[in-house]
Amino acid sequence: MKNKILIPILVPVLIFVMYSCNHVSAEKEAAQEIKKEISKDSLLSYGKYLVNTIGCRDCHSPKHFGPNGVEIITASDLSG
């Protein structure tokens, strides 16, 4: 009697597990393909773009008062 109840429950669970394992590996393969396509130069240029756009230098670079007001010390840019 227990086997008749257990089989209809186990079959869908096993199918779901098999599908989800296959689905995850397909996502990993797609992520690896994307990683291969991105070059180091494109990552660096994107990082420079983000730093300039978001304004990281405003808080993370030391400043001093110069003839034009507050200026970033370029020798220690983005050092803190």
Image (tube, grey):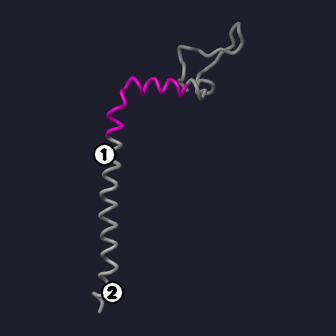
Q: Is residue 37 magenta?
A: yes
Q: Residue at x 34, y 32 (%)?
A: 37
Residue 68 horizontal/vertical position (percent) = 71, 9
Q: Is residue 35 left or right of residue 45?
A: left
The dominant secondary structure in magenta is helix
- Magenta-highlighted residues: 33-51
Q: Which residue is mark 1?
A: 29
Q: Residue at x 30, y 70 (%)?
A: 14
Q: Which residue is mark 2?
A: 5
* Residue 59: numbered disc: none
Instruction: Quarter of the image for the C terminus: give it.
Output: top right
Of 1 and 51, the residue lying toward us: 1
In this rendering, is residue 14 above or below 76?
below
- Of mark 1 and mark 2, the one earlier in the sequence is 2
Residue 65 horizontal/vertical position (percent) = 69, 13
Q: Is residue 77 left or right of residue 27?
A: right
Residue 18 horizontal/vertical position (percent) = 29, 64
Q: Residue at x 59, y 29 (%)?
A: 54
Residue 35 horizontal/vertical position (percent) = 35, 36
Q: Residue furthest left?
A: 3
Disc 2 is placed on an element classified as helix
Q: Could you tell me the amino acid type at mark 1?
A: Glu
Q: Residue furthest top?
A: 67
Q: Residue at x 39, y 23 (%)?
A: 41
